[in-house]
Amino acid sequence: MHIAVLAEFAVASGGAEKVAVESARGLAEAGIDVTYLQAIDGPADPLLDHPRIRRISLGNTDIWHRPAHRAALDGLWDAQAARRLGAALDALPVRPDLVHLHQWTRSLSPSVFPALFARGLPVVATLHDYFLACPNGVYYRFDRAEPCALRPLSAACIAAPCDGRSRLHKLVRVGRSVALRRALGRHHLDVIHVCDASLSRIPGLMPDLSLAHHRVDNPVRVEHGPPAEPARGDAIAYVGRLTREKGADLVAEAAQAAGLPALFIGSGPLEASLRGRPGVELLGWQAPDAVWRILRHRARALAAPSRWYETGPLTVYESLAHGLPVVASNRSGASEKVVDGVNGFSVSPDLAALTRAFATLADSGAAARLGAAAHARYWAAPMSLSAHAEALIRVYEGILTQRGPRRSQDTIPSAA
């Protein structure tokens, strides 16, 4: 089997790229030939250095590095990006059995879908967010600080000032969503959901499209070792971008109310306001290895109280693998791995609920019990790279079986 993985970066600059890179590596280790197509020029993660992985850069630039008017137009439809993708696929010596798309909003645009469909290649897209359905990508009302309840691209949706940047930005994103719907048209698209919540929610948001839905957990690259000792930790930890939609402000307020320090790893718009709070320590962004050295030493628990419908934040799964309890928002897909009161708490992202959970964790016995359960439950069914690759291969084989005989030894027919 030969799989083309299409992503905008070849380094783990975010959750989607991290999964794309690790998926490619997992597939290669499982004996699958992989062509990794990175849309944007730049460095590559060492994980892509494998004899079964061919890496090709399409030579695009990040849309946010282009002049504003050019970025707006290219975000709607970047014909040049589509031509570059088509040329790269046509130049491959062996035709891929399938193209797995991880992201298209930073440089590719909806124009890449017709380029893929025209070559007769099955396409599967992992839904790391809600951009397939929602113009702002997170199905969240930034103007109201609450999840959205509108039908995407309805009149009410188009009129809503929900974008986190501006009304003008919202209009550009609405245009991109319209272009995406037209590009998909009646074409069949297989999509992979990384959490049950996404699987139950997204089909109802876009019933007009021909989608087949699959469910595969994100991979977690944590070595099996001794569990952390959260009872020795002194702080409630938060890892990620410091924003209201991710609930960073709630962590600081609830930790203070529960009488615990709050430790933040990351940066973002709330950094200045958090820095002035008592009991708050900000460490900025850290290398992945450093993050877990710090958390295993300092954290009593990890808090991830997203106000939006976050799909699968990897830090939640990684914390459980290390034996750290997690306090997760019940709106987040990652809370599906948290059994309330057993390996952490799944709570509403509000001050009262978080304060109660943090107050329980202030008891060292409770923290130790929850941490031990987190480690034991995770490693009873680990979300390993090999398990992830096996699940992907089953999805691919099902798609290819429905499509008919494979053509992995064929060259790709030329397409305009």
Image: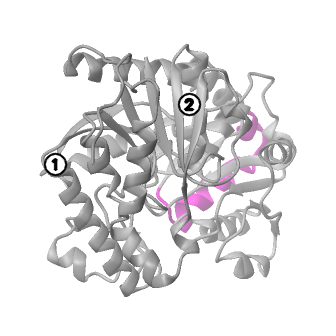
Q: Residues within 10 Å of mark 1 (few under 14, many from 20)?
A: some
Q: Earlier in the sequence, mark 2 or mark 1?
A: 2
Query: Is the residue 295 above or below the residue 343 in the image?
Result: below
Q: Residues within 10 Å of mark 2 (few under 14, many from 20)?
A: many
In front of the other: label 2 or label 1?
2
Q: Is 142 or 341 nearer to us in this picture?
A: 142
Dominant secondary structure of the residues highlighted in magenta in the image: helix
Residue 24 numbered mark, or none: 2
Q: Residue at x 40, y 77 (%)?
A: 72
Element assignment for label 1: loop
Inspect the image, locate mark 2, and give the three-letter code of the amino acid beneath it. Answer: Ala
Whether the residues at callouts 2 and 1 have beta carbons within 8 Å, the answer is no
- Give the image quarter of residue 316: top right
Query: Is the residue 14 above or below the residue 76 in the image?
Result: above
Q: Is residue 313 visible?
A: no
Magenta range:
348-369
Q: Residue at x 19, y 65 (%)?
A: 151
The picture places residue 68, in percent across and down from the top left corner, at: 48, 83
Q: Is 380 or 347 nearer to us in this picture?
A: 380
Q: Is 339 or 393 nearer to us in this picture?
A: 393
Q: State the residue position of label 1.
A: 209
